[in-house]
Image: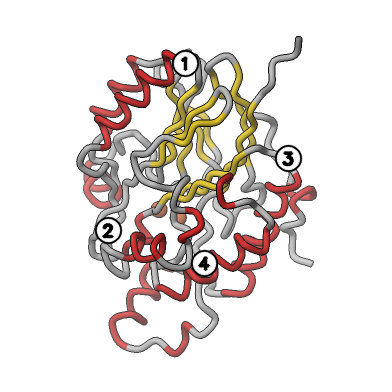
Amino acid sequence: MIEPMTQVAHLSDLHLLEDNHEERRGAARRRLAYISLGRAYEPRARRDRAARALAAARSSGADHLVLTGDLTEDGAPAQFTILAELLAASGWAPERVTLIPGNHDAYDGAAAWDDALSGPLGAYRTTSTLGAPVRLHGLTILPLSTSVAQHYTRSRGELQEGALAAVESAAADSRRSGAALVLAMHHPPRRNPLLPLQWIDGFRDHVALGALLGAHDHVHVLHGHTHLATDHAVRPGATPRIFATEAVVDGSSPLRLYTARHGRLRPEARVALARLSLAPA
Ligand SMILES: [Fe+2]
Ligand SMILES: [Fe+2]
């Protein structure tokens, strides 16, 4: 008998931007100029890339889609509305999509993410509730936020209160059922080796989360933020369990696919640029 497998599609860092951003004035305009850091604004191009990446993820036949944060450029309400429109047009059923916030999604204020999930992204709330496991066949996804309210000159991350307990509980529960556990989060669960960068851009809870990853071989991480595709092992020489994907906003192959089987998550070969049609037309 062939054991059924669950396949997950992973996209990150869409950095969606509203068309009329040039109408911004004052602090909101300065914030956008700073955080874009030389990245061309091009709101339509960003939207097109996101639409094509979502379509490619859908046509892959994956069972579930995880978007690991920085979905918007700075968390402005109009940007979440664009995301909702793109998701609706993609044909992904909302109950098969998990969204989590990144540092960029909080620059407009601490409440921006909750407001979006209560508003335009309401259809995705059930499968995107922070700390609430999403149970699939042989795979559990735990949405986590590392997003904090901070000045736009910083991009650090930390887990919310109660998140570590939620990870422990989901790890025990998934171990009993034989499922692989995926922590969906934005920041990489590591310390930046350069102290000033750890202060500006680091993940605060790397020690505690690292201990949990070390204690549970069936726990994996999907993250964004680095805009790079990487596979990291929890221990030197071990099979990688921490996976990042290129940014949709500027990556050449931002879609990653993984298969859950026998309590483990394994990445598939990266999806080539040509298949995604992300090259300029
Ligand atoms: Fe990003
Ligand atoms: Fe980020």
* Label annotation for residue 154: 2
* Element assignment for label 3: loop
Report the mark closest to the observer, 4 or 3: 3
Dot 4 or dot 2: first in sequence order is 4
Tags 1 and 2 in contact by the CB under 8 Å rule? no
**Left or right, residue 112 beside residue 252:** left
Say above or below: 150 vs 173. below
- Mark 1 residue CB less than 8 A from any atom of ligand 2: no
Report the mark closest to the observer, 3 or 1: 1
Q: Position of residue 79 (x, y in %)?
A: 47, 71
Residue toward you, 103 or 114: 114
Q: Amino acid at mark 2?
A: Arg
Residue toward you, 195 or 90: 90
Q: Amino acid at mark 3?
A: Gly
User: Which residue is under mark 1?
Assistant: 177
- Residue at 20% of width from left, 42% of height from top? 161
Dot 1 or dot 2: first in sequence order is 2
User: Which residue is under mark 4?
Assistant: 16
Q: Position of residue 170 (x, y in %)?
A: 36, 26
User: Which residue is under mark 3?
Assistant: 61
Tags 4 and 2 in contact by the CB under 8 Å rule? no
Dot 4 or dot 3: first in sequence order is 4
